[in-house]
Amino acid sequence: MTKRIGNKDIAQHRSKEEKKRIHASNVAMEAQKQAAAREKYRNMQKGQPFNVMKEV
């Protein structure tokens, strides 16, 4: 359920600048997650389970 102010959702009350700022922060967070995942699986072969390669 979305939070509401009266009959409108909170998102409808946000300014364009706030929406841009939220979008930019979401993109940055996703880039950090992807970079961490790339680093974690950097030397892995495709199709190999994670725990098998970790022992080597």
Image: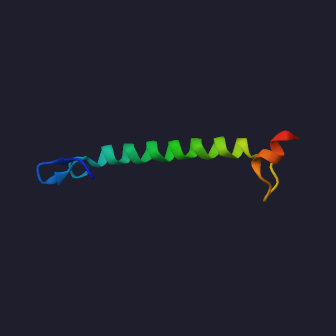
**In the rendered image, which quarter contains the C terminus?**
top right
Q: Is residue 1 above or below residue 29?
A: below
Q: Give the x, y percent position of residue 48.
A: 80, 55
Q: Is residue 43 visible?
A: no
Query: In the image, is 16 to the left or to the right of 49?
Result: left
Q: Is residue 25 visible?
A: yes
Q: Residue at x 71, y 41 (%)?
A: 39
Q: Give the x, y percent position of residue 3.
A: 23, 47
Q: Residue at x 12, y 54 (%)?
A: 7
The single residue placed furthest to the bottom in the displayed view is 47
Q: Give the x, y percent position of residue 51.
A: 77, 45
- Residue 32 location, quadrant: top right
Q: Nearer the viewer, residue 32 or 19?
A: 32
Q: Give the x, y percent position of residue 9.
A: 21, 52
The single residue placed furthest to the left in the displayed view is 6
Q: Residue at x 65, y 41 (%)?
A: 36
Name the colouring of the figure: rainbow
User: How many numbered callouts?
Assistant: 0
Query: In the image, is 51 to the left or to the right of 36?
Result: right
Query: In the image, is 7 to the left or to the right of 13?
Result: left
Q: Residue at x 53, y 46 (%)?
A: 30
